[in-house]
Image (cartoon, coloured by chain):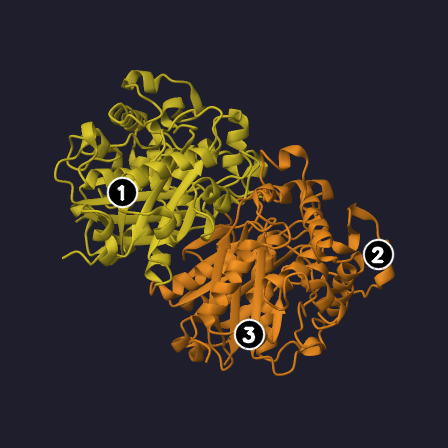
Chain colours: A yellow, B orange
Amino acid sequence: MVRKPLVSIVSAGLSKFGKRKEMYSREMFAEAVTEAFERCPNLEPKRDIEALIVGHMGESYEHQGHTGPTLSDWAGLLPIPATRIESACASSGVALRCGIFAVLSGMHDVVMVGGVEKMTHRTTSDATEFLAMASDFPFEQWHGMTFPGLYALIATAHMHKYGTTEEQMAMVAVKNHRHGTLNPKAHMQKEITLEKALSSRLIAWPLKLYDCSLITDGASCLILTKPELARKFTDTPVHIIGSEQASDAIGLYEREEFTTLKAAKLAARETYRMAKVESKDVDVAEVHDCFTIAEIVAYEDLGFCKPGEGGSLMEKGATAIEGELPVNTSGGLKSKGHPVGATGTAQAYEIYLQLTGQAERRQVEDAEIGLTHNVGGSGASAAVHLYRRE
Amino acid sequence: MVRKPLVSIVSAGLSKFGKRKEMYSREMFAEAVTEAFERCPNLEPKRDIEALIVGHMGESYEHQGHTGPTLSDWAGLLPIPATRIESACASSGVALRCGIFAVLSGMHDVVMVGGVEKMTHRTTSDATEFLAMASDFPFEQWHGMTFPGLYALIATAHMHKYGTTEEQMAMVAVKNHRHGTLNPKAHMQKEITLEKALSSRLIAWPLKLYDCSLITDGASCLILTKPELARKFTDTPVHIIGSEQASDAIGLYEREEFTTLKAAKLAARETYRMAKVESKDVDVAEVHDCFTIAEIVAYEDLGFCKPGEGGSLMEKGATAIEGELPVNTSGGLKSKGHPVGATGTAQAYEIYLQLTGQAERRQVEDAEIGLTHNVGGSGASAAVHLYRRE
């Protein structure tokens, strides 16, 4: 018997992901918020929303910090408390968790959580540098290490220890690109072949261009409330039944192992325990495929297979949309795109659509239990959430 | 009758504030954490601390984001959830509020909140630019506006509307510098005269050098728990009885008035209401004197006097340490220093010392109710907390 809900999601919004030219973060966020309000006509924003908690990773992209009031101002939500969370690429997964705290605390009944990032107006070199701020400055960045480099170390360790292959990693890209074509809001809208992925240019061996997620602009949001109030706003709430977060050493060099993200594994274990469900109960999952190897490691850390078997799980097709456990039906970070601060609540948005039967061409039939897995940096932060439909 | 506590502070720590050469944020934060642990021998850090929530304003100073796990790693607190909050100069006041949520939510029993900033290794020009990220990029920063400029607009509006004088502002500086000499951890340790303050070089008229707070390095932390668990850790807990946060338009140009910070006024009103106390009940307060005019406006927004009377309240000496309502006994941002991310919980640290009789040469006798007022940017964020001793 799964546990009673912590909080309920009564609406959700997502901006179009992609290159959003001449849009500021605040404008994209307002786009996501508008969708969330339109889905939920019973909700009166100025009356009902009591706090805003948003994930935003980098103030350097737009030379803009103080993101909380900037976004709440443009979303028409002043003067409620508006807070920015930064946990690297897990910023909005962690913002979601803080929103859960805010509701459970009894201090707020209805809270908006979300996230945003505007990245594509900067050069790839700038974006790579800003992203690298999520790794250790004195011991990683200083020596020229970048995120493709860090995940390449994870990939080579996984290949060495378990025999994972470049082909298996490329299959993740092929799968997620295919899923992305089913999602009109995804950044990429094209299928790729295994050959194309494998022959794309090297970024950091063994990772090639198609092993890397996209630099994307986008925003996402959710509206949370107490389970007992959810019916006031919607007939189809989605309940959050588990929420955990954990941390690991900021530097990859400090980790005991490269082949698993300990923080994600720990957060997953505790989330399953809190929700009283097991990995086999999960019907649909959005996992943090910032690089293809990260999705393979996620399968293992989430208990979808044993350690070392992530590559073969992919190869068997189990995680494709028609498989036993569809993963990243949205296209994932790989094809939907990875506007870093927006990713955590964008994953939750996809699960919200799936569990309310609104995922259209990518709908997973009878999905009842969903999971999101959001990772910051090379695994120094992770937030895992479990959801169930009404 | 004041309300029952929301949560209790069972320990607190503060690094030395000042120019901390060759120290990283993580090292200063560990210094603050060490003090907090030493004050509280009954607490077993690895066993008891369940989450870390820290304020950190700018990733640009040290080219380091992902501050949560970076700090928790160096503080020996892995693998607990570690989250960074950014609300400009109100970052750790807001982190404190999120820590209160975490405890009230029932998901964590003991939580560390805190903040940190390392600023002095950068040029003044860099620091000015990084601080400006808390203002509006397209409509303020882009046009060359800086924080001294924004607060100069607030000062001139206040002078125009209420007759506030440059002398009254300078008196805030003189008072807080005197208080700073009583605080061995303050950055500045020297008294100044009114003449010295008034004749210091212009930064943005009417604000002169001594009207501006300091660019400082420092870290602060508090340990929070449920009131019913506080006695397990200390005989002298300090209870938080009110916590509110509010937002206003990010840009000063959008505000209805320049002479008051609406977010701070609203947060104060709601905090008093929550705590069931009135402004006249406050025995000691730490307010956000990022510029001297900000302290004068704070007196008015907090109800210590009527609108327009902040200057004369200062002139009467009411807010000096020997006055009726001592404000900024720590020296304030003006003399203790303003390591932006650390300021909110550093204010709470001072109130903790005052309410537990540990403030030594600056002890306010019989202080029972304390208040902190922490402002982000030119007032787009504000967090106000009320405290009472056991």
Q: Indicate the quadrant containing the N terminus of chain A: top left, top right, bottom left or bottom right.
A: bottom left
Q: Is residue B96 above or below residue A80?
A: below
Q: Nearest to the eye among marks 3 and 2: give it.
A: 2
Q: Earlier in the sequence, mark 3 or mark 2?
A: 3
The image quarter in which residue B265 lies? bottom right
What residue is pinned by disc 3? B39
What residue is pinned by disc 1? A41
Secondary structure state at the residue bearing disc 1: loop
Q: CA distance from mark 3 to mark 2?
A: 41 Å
Residue drawn at x 29%, y 33% is A163
Mark 3 residue type:
Arg
Mark 1 residue type:
Pro
Q: Are marks 3 and 2 in contact (CB under 8 Å)?
A: no
Secondary structure state at the residue bearing disc 3: loop
Mark 2 residue type:
Leu
Question: Residue B198 bears which disc, if any?
Answer: 2
- Labels 3 and 1 within one chain: no
- In the image, residue B368 lies at what x, y percent? 56, 79
